[in-house]
Amino acid sequence: MPTVFEQLERYAPAERPAAVVHALRQLARRAGHDLIVMSRLAHEAHKNGYWSKVSRPDGEPYLSEEEFFVEVLQVWSWRTAFRRIQIGRAIEELSEGSRDEVAGRLAAVGVAKASALAPLLEKKPDALEMWIRRAETIPLEDLQEAVSDALAAKPRGTGSGEPRRNSRSCMN
């Protein structure tokens, strides 16, 4: 099977920009699907405490769940790992017959939009269909603002001066 680069070599210079953009869109869709699968498995790993049942590749134990997820999911922060867990939990709380369809639709809108929807999907699962349809039609920034409004949440970085509750305390 030819690689993406080998396939792109077949295009004339004038056709290459459109071909590259098409390839990027296809790869983003594939990555979105993989990230939703990763989210579902991250929820399972969180729910079952797998971080304390496995070791690092060097045989040393993980010292915390945060350390485990940041390393295993290869994300920059615990917040990002937590969003993946939220997406997985929201999907797993659905009826078994609708999980795969919803997972596919979340993958199609992309992991950034799915991450923006994550807190809302957990708190208002009855509105899932409406929010996914909305995510399909509006830009990420507008979606994030709409989700914040629906949850009466302040945008990040505009805190009230009150100490924030640590996200790990909200996970159970």
Image: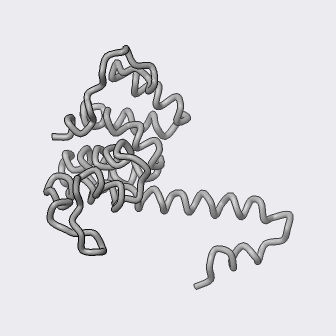
The picture places residue 2, in percent across and down from the top left corner, at 62, 83
Residue at image x 29%, y 74%?
58
Q: Nearer the viewer, residue 91 or 136?
A: 91
Left or right, residue 108 beside residue 24 = left
Q: In which quarter of the image is residue 132?
A: top left
Q: Which of 11 and 158 is in front in this view?
A: 158
Q: Quadrant of residue 69?
A: bottom left
Left or right, residue 144 beside residue 15 = left
Residue at image x 43%, y 37%?
133
Q: Is residue 65 above or below residue 172?
A: below
Assign the C terminus to one quadrant of the image: top left
The picture places residue 50, in percent across and down from the top left corner, at 18, 61
Q: In this view, does 164 lie above or below 168?
A: above
Q: Quadrant of residue 63?
A: bottom left
Q: Is residue 81 above or below residue 60?
A: above
Assign the N terminus to one quadrant of the image: bottom right
Residue at image x 68%, y 58%?
21
